[in-house]
Amino acid sequence: MANVRVPIWDGNPGSVSGSTPFGYYDNDSLFQTDAPKIAKMIANRLGYPVMDVELTSGSIYSVIEESVTEYSSIVNQYNTIDNFINIQGSSTENVNLSGKVIKHSLDRVISLAKNYSAEVGAGGNIDWLTGSIDLQSGVQDYDLQDLYTQAGGSGSIEIKRIFHQAIPANLRYFDPNLGNRDFLNALGLSGYAQGVTYTLTPYTMFEDLIRMQAIEFNDQFRKSTYSFELINSKLRIFPVPDVDHKLYYHYIKTDDRRNVIESSGSNVVSDASNVPYNNLEYSKINDMGRTWIKNYALALAKESLGLIRGKYPSIPIPNSTITLNANDLLIQAQEEKEKLKQELTDLLDKLSKRSQLEKMDAEVESMNNQLRNIPRRIYIK
C-alpha cells in the first residue's frame, strides 16, 4: 500500500480544451473560462488545501461536462414531452430545436381527426371508391365482396353507402312534366301545356313541405318502400327488383385503413429517439442553470472521490492508519444528485404548457372573484 501513488489535486487546473471525454464545449469560450473556476470551487468544497483531494483537473472537468449534458438532457426531455404533438412528423434535416420556441400547431390534431372523418365520408385519409352491380329481376340477395372479386378486384372491401332509394319526393313534386299538373289543377289552370310553361305559384314553403311529406308517407305505408339490409358484404334488396338495373355503392379497401405509416425515413420526427434537441450551449444557460450545474458537478465529484477512496479504505501512516470517508461521500453524492434532479424536474413541470394554462385560469378566476366584490355604481336619470 505504501508504494501506491495516487494523483492528488495540486491547486493548478490545466487547460480545459482536450481534457473532457467528449469535448462538447471546447469551442464555448464561457465554458473554457468557468470550468477552471468551478474546478477550484469543487476542490475547496472537498477539503483542499487542508486535505488531499485524490482527483486531477481532468477528472473534475469530466464531471463538469457531464453536469452540463445532464442539465441539457433533462431540459430537452421536458421540451420533447411538452412539444411533441407539434413537432411529430416535422423534418429533422439541419434542424436544432434547442433554444427555439415551438409554436402551437393543429396539424397533428387534424391528422388524428381525419381518421374519424374518413369513416363517415367527410374527407380524411382513406379514399372512398365507387362500385356497381347489376340487379336482376326477381333476385334479392347479392354478395358484394364476391362480385367485387369476380370483377377483378383484390383484397377485402367494406361497404360504406348503398344508393338504393325511391325518387325523392321533391323531385316528383316539382317535376316539370308531372308535378306541375298538381300545381296547375290546384290553381284552376289545368289547360296550360306541361313542361313549357313557367308558373309562379302562391304556395308557401310550409305547404310545399306538407305535400312532400304526404308523398313520402304514401310510399311508406301504401307501397313496398325502398330499403336494404347489409350484413358484412351480404346485401338484400327491398322490394324484390322487378326489372334489371344497376345499383351503385361506395366502399373502401380495408387494407387502406390498415396502412398506418404516415411517413417513413430518417428525416422526420417519428418518436423521442430522433427529436432534434441538441446539447444546450453553456454560454446561453442562465445563472440559475449554471448554479444547478455547479452543484451537480460537486455531487459527481464526491461520487468519483468516494469510489477512489473506497478502493483504498485506509492509508497506513507511522504507528497508525487513516480511515477514509468513502461511504459518506457516496451517500452524500447520491442524495444530492437525486435532490437536484427533483428540483429541476419540479421547475420544468411548473413551466410546462399545461401548468402555465392552469395558472392563467387560476389568475383569471381570482381576478373575477375580486371584481365581484367591487360595489357597482347606481345610475339615476
Image (cartoon, rainbow, N blue to C red):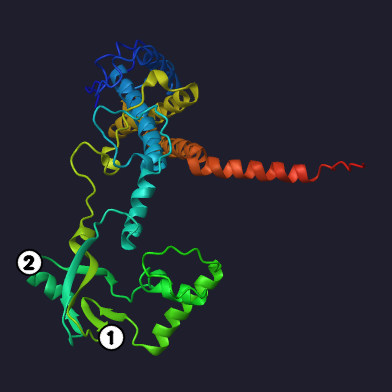
Residue 250 at x, y = what percent? 24, 66
Q: Is residue 41 above or below residue 197?
A: above
The quarter of the picture where residue 276 lies is top left
Give the residue number, with chain letter if any, for mark 1. 239
Residue 169 at x, y = what percent? 40, 74
Circle on res. 165: none
Image quarter of the N terminus: top left
Residue 347 at x, y = what percent? 50, 37
The quarter of the picture where residue 316 lies is top left
Q: Is residue 257 above or below residue 235?
A: above
Residue 380 at x, y = what percent? 92, 42
Q: The residue under label 1 is which amino acid type?
A: Pro
Give the residue number, with chain letter if any, for mark 2. 152
Q: The residue under label 2 is which amino acid type?
A: Gly
Q: Name the residue located 42 percent from the left edge and 88 percent from the top edge.
A: 221
User: In front of the other: label 2 or label 1?
Assistant: 1
